[in-house]
Amino acid sequence: MRFQFQQALRAVILLAFVIFLFQLHNSGDLYQYINPKYEVLSQVGCFLFLILFLVQLTRIWAKKSCSCCSNGTGHTHDHGDGALGLKKVFFYIVILLPILSGTLMPEVTLNSSIAEKKGSMMSLANTALSSKENKQVDPGNANIEPEPQMPGNPANENIPLEHYEEDPNVSQNIMEKAKYDQIMSKLQSENHIQFTEQLYAPFYQEINENMRQFVGKEITLTGFIYKEKDFKPNQFVLGRFLITHCIADANLIGFLSELEHGTEPKEDTWVEAKGRIEIQEYDGVEMPALKIEEWKEIGEPKHPYVYPVSIQIH
Amino acid sequence: MLATRHLFIDIAGIVLLGIVIFLMSTANSLTIFHSLPDSIYQMNMLFLSILIEALPFVLIGVLIAGFIQIFVTETMIEKWLPKNRLLAICASCFAGALFPACECGIVPIVRRLVGKGVPIYAGIGFLLTGPLINPIVIASTYMAFGNNMKIAVLRMVAGFIIAIIASFTLSIFFQGNELKHAVALQSHDHPTKHPFSERLSNMLKHTVDEFFDMGKYLVFGALAAAFVQTYISTGDLVSIGSSVAASTGLMMGLAYLLSLCSEADAFIGASFKNLFPTTAVLGFLIYGPMIDLKNTFMMLSVFRKRLVFGFILIVSAVVFGVLMLIQPFL
């Protein structure tokens, strides 16, 4: 029996992964990396690391690490009992790299520099091109009259939207189909639309798809400021990153915005803004845009990203 | 002499370990890491998110590989797999389509299967369809393209055909098992010798070793993908090409560089659907799950270099060629 240093080192690395993942869950920082919907999967990963750690513990004092390879025909992989050469030290450092960089470097939220690299204006233009009015492929749908707006019915205007604000159920973002359909069908008849974290993506989609029916409506939304090089000084995009799985697949959704007067918000500041929808042309593409009427700076929200809604069918 | 050397290494290792623990516990007081350029932090976040997303899949893949090791014998594979090369490829592509895997988890599984005597071309067929054709990918593609079945179906059908052609082409050039450590796996096939509990514990120990084998490549892959996302502009890339052929090539290149998970790439693919012809978007959707930057590193940990590069070349050519052929009908 001899203390197997490399086996011990491996055990420690496995434990470090367990602790690292556990801390991410525990502190809620995990939401800075992945869609909370996939949290369970990551917990499974954490659990598997724990099992591997426990298994690895038994090898630290073992004479030989793996009895099944003892017939000496050769080894498929490194069992971790050889001498610790420079190359191996390097590989262990590589494996530890995520834990080191994750602990040492501050957590940040993806910002406008990533939005620029991801070609966000291109992606906004693409969504606008999906508009039913732009494509005109589906005459059945295109002919639907804009729903009457019923300005005389205040009950229809204000109450429901207040409702959705509660329970933004960020951890799962699940919504029943009936409720979702009800909200979406009413959307075109609302005069004021409040973007919530839960329904940010469907509202954005809906407004892009039927942009003309939303012209003149007032919307309130939160987001960060992103400016492209060829923007006018009073132009910016107000939006948030939509995360499908992990932040590597982030996609900026939001609106091209223009400020009539007053000082423009600086890039990467988080604001809550109220504006009216109009149609603007950018690079030859007509897209819904916002004429900002008022805005105020807010701090970065606790959950800076938005996620697709999972609709639950009963 | 040897004992002194061991002692020295042990001491050096303990010192290294101490440094790691020290760094982890005093993380917040090390201000030097708080004054780097912001883009480094952004890259670090992307890097970690790719890893956090991929790790559970890799671990599950390694575990499944371990189960194959215990429960599947070479005789079984010999019995199940058709002798005919083309039939074997079709069978393995079909098995991949039924098997819900993702591109991170499938590499260790294929390694184990090939080690058990599955011909390399059949293993590759399985590797190509596994991440591409599964219920989650179909559902997310359907949703991402505005609840439209057309792209999802095209992705699956064209992907399946491409996988068969690519595996067959590969079978012409590669016959051996092409594993990095070729001889080794044969010696493992003695399932009756040990009691079950011992086999299980050996399997778990192997899982640890495979994780360390593959983990470093996964880290390199994630780092490379995060670097691309932080410093290379998608807009500049896609503005180069406008013809169908050029844009298809570019979208395939983009899929390779971004290294997105096949279950999430449909939404990114959809964000190009009106800027590029359907053929180019399909190129993105089919090529990405088959091979990408992160995956290249993982494959290099298992297979010989010449196989990995041959594989990339063949898959790229076949995906591009097939898309160009079907393009007039899209």
Image (spheres, coloured by chain):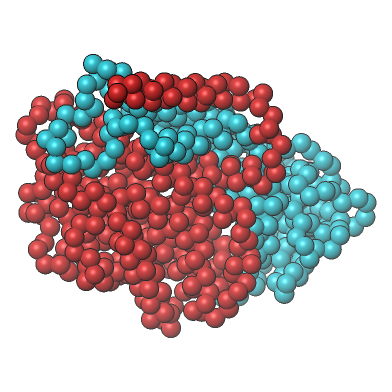
Judged from this view, the residue extending furthest toward the right is A262
Horizontally, is A208 left or right of B105 in the view?
A: right
Residue B181 percent location from the top left of the image: 24, 48
Quadrant position of residue A44: top left
Q: Which chain is red?
A: B
Q: Is A113 on the left-hand or right-hand side of A258?
A: left
Of B282 and B258, nearer the camera is B258
- The residue sitting at the bottom extreme is B328
Rendered residue at 73%/72% (across/down): A283
Instruction: Point out residue B311 in the picture as x, y percentages from the top left corner.
Output: 33, 64
Whether residue B240 appears in this view of the structure is: yes
Q: Is residue B129 visible to the viewer in this orientation of the structure?
A: no
> Is B270 located above or below residue A18 in the figure?
below
Residue B184 locus on image (x, y percent) = 18, 45
Depth check: give the residue in front, A149 or A18. Answer: A18
Task: Name the residue located 80 percent from the left edge and 47 percent from the top edge.
Answer: A273
At 38% from the left edge and 73% from the top edge, which residue is drawn? B317
Position of the C terminus of chain B by quadrant: bottom left
In the picture provided, is B34 more to the left or to the right than A30?
right
* Figure colour of chain A: cyan
Q: Quadrant of residue A217?
A: bottom right
Residue positioned 56% across, 55% down in the render? B228
